[in-house]
Every structure is written in C-alpha cells, then in structure tokens.
Amino acid sequence: MSVPKPSSISESASLAADVILSKFDEYQRRFTEITRRARQRFENRDWPGIRADSVERMDLYELVLTETAGELQQHIGSRIQDRGLWFEIKSAFLPLLAGRHDADVAATFFNSVTRKVLLTVGIDREIEYFRLAASPTTVSDVSVITTRYPAGRPTADVVREILRGLNFDTEYENLERDVDSVSREIDLHLWPIVGYDGYEGIEMIRSPFFRNKVAYLVGRVCISERRCLPLVMPLYHGDHGIYVDTALLSERDVSVVFSFAFSYFLVEINRPDELISFLRTLLPDKPIAELYVSIGHNKHGKTEFYRDLHRFVHRSHEQFMIAPGREGSVMIVFTLPEYGFVFKVIKDYPCYLRSLDQTSKTADRQEVMWRYDLVRHRDRVGRMVDTQEFENLRFRRWRFSDQLLAEFAIAARGSITLESNHVVIHHLYVQRRVTPLLMYLMQEKDPELIRRVVLDFGYFLKDLAATGIFPSDLFNIWNYGVTRRGRVVLFDYDDVWPLEKPNFRDKPKPRDEFEEMESEQEWIVAMQDDFFMDEIERFSGMPDRLRGVFRSVHADLYTSEFWRDMQRRVRAGEVVDITPYDLSRRFPR
C-alpha cells in the first residue's frame, strides 16, 4: 500500500533523521580512529595489533547499527515500525546530505537502519534510497588524496623524494639500495612506451594501504594526460628497518593485491569517493563494489553490488539456474549464466560432511553460518573468496528456472518462500564466480600455467594455515577455485576448522603380525579430530600426473611436523607473513 507524501515533516521524523546522521558520523569517526592506528602499529611492528584492528573495524558497522536502533527506540518509541513515519524520516534525511562528499555512503547507512528496524523484504523504494545508476567515478580533484612528484629529472630522484616523504618514525634498512631497485623497475616499464622521451610525473596516494605486515604505497606513473601505469610498492618493516620489497607496475599484479577475497586495507583517507575514482584509473576492470570492500567499506560495497545485480537483471532476460558443477551437500548454488557471481542458500536438512578418515558428521544451519563467520574474522590473506551476506531479497518468480524452483521447494524451505508471483530469499551468500581447480587443470593446455597453479595451490594451503584456517577436506580440490588472474582461492567453507582444533598425527604402524593381517579399522583408534597427515596423499584429488610437480615444492604439506608447527605459531599469536604477488618479483637484499 502506498504511503502518502507528507505535507510537512513532523518533529519526530526530524529528530529521527538527526539521530541517524549523528550515528553515521560517529561510525565514520570510529572507523577513522581504528584505521589511523595502523601507521603506528606498522612502525612498532605490532602485527597482532593490526590484525585485531582489522577485526574490530569489520564488526563496527553492525555494532553502530544496533546502537542506532536503540537510540531511535528511545526517541520515537512504539512508532519505530510505523512505515508512514519512516517515509517522513527519509524525506527529512535527504536535505541533511546536501553538499556531503559521503552522501552515497550515508544513504547506505540509512538503508541499513531501516532494514534492521523494519526487517524489510525486497526493496521498499518509499522508505529506502535506491537507484539503478552506478556511482560516478570521475576524479574531480586528485590533489585531495595524492601528492604529485614531477618528472624532468632522474627517476631515482623522484623515488627518493617519495620514500623520504613518508616520514615514518623509523629508519630505512638501505634507502639508496631501494631507490635504485624501484627506479630501475620504473624505467624498464617506461622504455617500451616512451623510449627516450620523458613522462609527466608520479602521483602517489598520501596514506599507505596497511594490511597484515605490509604498507603498500599506491599510485601511478603519469605518461600523458590519458595514459598511466599503476605503481604499487610494498614496504616491510624488518629487523633492520623498513625496506621496499618490490615494485608492481602491471594491472594484473596490482589487481591481485586488490583481490576480491577477505583482506581489507587500513588506509586513512577522508574522501573515499575520490579514492575509489583514483583506483579505478589503475584497475578499470575492477568493479566499484570490490574496491569499496577492499578499503573496508564492505556495506557500501554491498550496495554497489546490489545496484549492479539489479541493473543486470533489469536489462537481461536470463533466468537464475542451478550452477554447473558438482552438487553440494550443504548449499544450493545457482547463478545467472552471463553474470560473474554465484548465489548460495543453505539447505534445510542436516548436511552430511565427510572428513579424511571417512567418518560422517552433520552440520546444521547454525554451524554452516558459524563457519562462514569464522572465515570472515580470520582470513587476512586474500585466499578465501569474499562472501557478501544478504537477507530478505525478492525477485519475480519467472526469473527462476523450473529446475531451480523445484530444488528450492524440496531442499530450501527454511531459506526460500515461493509466492505466486515472487521468490523471497530470506538468507543468501554471494560470491564471485571462479573456475573449480580440477576443471581448470583439465581445461588448461599450457604446461607452465598448469605448473604455476599447482604450485600456487600449495602456497594457498600454507597461507590458510598461516591465518589459522584448516580445510578439513584438505585435498578435495572441488572446493577450490582459480581466479581469472590464476590465483587459487577457497570458495566452499563447509569444512573449514580453526587450525587449533585438529589433532595432527602420523599413522600408527602395526605392532605385531596379527595387526598386520587385520584391517586397519580393527586396530587403529582415531577420533573425529584426528588427521593422519602422512596418509593425506592417498586421498588427494590432485591428478596423479601432477602430484610430482606439487611434491617437488610442497612435500612438507604431507607431514604432521608442518601442521603442528603452524598450529603452535597460530596459538602463540604469531602473524605469519603472506605475499599476494609472485615471490620472484622480490628485490634482492
């Protein structure tokens, strides 16, 4: 039923609008305070502190939403679920956004408040801000967020000025060595483009992008008004000072650093709109939603993704259909054929998961959701596909294939309501689509690309261990995917455990001739949390012909010693170094 437009805004509506904007400003302030701590953490090598700050900031949005709902309850009482009042509040809130550079993000916050209070199903355009148009991404004033270093002099002089201008409260390990390494790399990349000619200069975002143990300097080499090269310099703080690990000057390498997996930067910029616009010049193929998520504004990233999804649905005539591949025991996975994402809903019945010792265990809805939350809070290495969580979405029923509707009716009645003309999805996970690892290995014909991915799979498992994640179905390679940049990631979280939980063992040997003659099941006692790591290769889904390549570098993954050592380090709170780019690109030290 349509709510009539109010002829005037009531005092209650104006007060509520002021409360919401005030809480949004408080959220922004607290977000910035947490982010600002990253610089000092890096200078002090306080790696656990950076990790704790990342988790605190990620949970801040929901915390402030809860506080906002509580304050609104105090101010407007029983009318808090009055849609007519909310229509007035929306009208009162809009003028408050005039002239604000963060108006779009503030509108997302307003929508989040309405959905938390009213439990809105679908989009209620009368009380929510919604538009199909994408956010503008034109940089209006690059000087707001960057410093420009003019060329017309040796590149080494420009690089030296950039590094000295950071003014870290600690010394460089060897500044002139790093200046020489970086300038040599920049000049190499410039040569095929400009030859003996000059270039305009280098523009660098003023705040480093802090993540884990690294401070990334992000900018661009300006060749002309319309052409530039991305420039990313990862800085580490080692035992003898700060050093530049490498210089990344290709869109591919920089895109991996800004991957769409759970791994958010701490970057102190008070103009996220200008920052996103600038990053788009470096990564034109990267969706706006993923860039917002990468800098910690994941809720507004959800808004941008939702706009993109609705634009796609609005202009296409595709139907949602069951995603190709093996059916999952826990999730119904569906997609739009030409859309680059998959959608997941949890099945109703207890889901039978299987561990390496072949014993069955069940996982109900709460356990599955707990595992996804575990990933969200632990993954700081960009190895697990970033998952957006949505509630109460509504689409027209004809947009779904008959096969998918039948699957919903059989297995997802707790997550889906099938109405006569609509489908309401009460709980949904959305992930970027990747190529399943086994499918990639079967389709790829270049031996060197296959080698790279097989070896990256081993580095991927080690990265997960470093962040305290253990995929209990370790070598079920249907759970892993390959991104378009050739990076191995995990997209199925049904079997993830905290690394502290498993008991890593070596398989017992028969004690006498009678045990040698009996079946192993008769005399080996194994608990549910036991994993015989020296037997892992027997259960590996890695094709036999590729196991030699994998073992040539990652034989330690088949040993209990490796896993127990990682377990010890994680329990001790150690933050293990993770490198998202090719290790061969590191400068010699």
Image (spheres, helix red, strand yellow):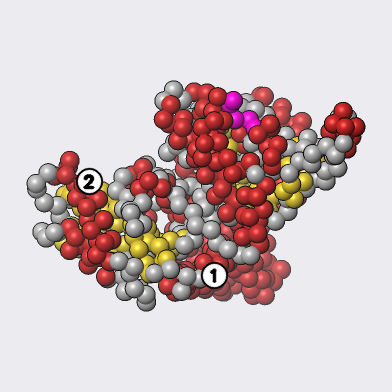
Inspect the image, locate mark 2, and give the three-letter code of the amino acid beneath it.
His
Q: Residue at x 65, y 50 (%)?
A: 561
User: What residue does disc 1 label?
Assistant: 49
Rendered location of residue 122, percent (x, y): 61, 46
Secondary structure beneath disc 1? helix
Q: Which mark is residue 476?
A: none
Q: Please tell me whether residue 588 is drawn above or below residue 43 in the rendered image.
A: above
Q: Please tell me whether residue 573 is drawn above or below residue 547 in the rendered image.
A: below
Q: Residue at x 35, y 48 (%)?
A: 585
| C-alpha distance separating marks 1 and 2 | 37 Å
Earlier-in-chain disc, 1 versus 2: 1
The answer to whether residue 323 is left or right of residue 207 is right
Residue 479 in sight:
yes
The answer to whether residue 298 is left or right of residue 150 is right
Q: Crowdedness of circle 1 by 10 Å Cα count: few (<14), some, many (20+)?
A: some
Q: Can you tell which quarter of the image residue 215 is in? A: bottom left
Q: Can you tell which quarter of the image residue 525 is in? A: top right
Foreground pick, 410 / 252: 252
Rendered location of residue 306, percent (x, y): 51, 46
Q: Please tell me whether residue 244 is drawn above or below residue 471 in the rendered image.
A: below
Inspect the image, locate mark 1, and give the three-letter code of the amino acid beneath it.
Gly
Rendered location of residue 123, percent (x, y): 58, 48
User: What residue does disc 2 label?
Assistant: 189
Q: Check if residue 36 falls in the magenta segment.
A: no
The range drawn in magenta is: 540-544
Secondary structure beneath disc 2? helix
The answer to whether residue 272 is left or right of residue 203 is right
Q: Please tell me whether residue 546 is drawn above or below residue 177 in the rendered image.
A: above
Q: Crowdedness of circle 2 by 10 Å Cα count: few (<14), some, many (20+)?
A: some
Rendered location of residue 559, percent (x, y): 65, 44
Q: Residue at x 42, y 72 (%)?
A: 43
Q: Residue at x 55, y 49 (%)?
A: 463
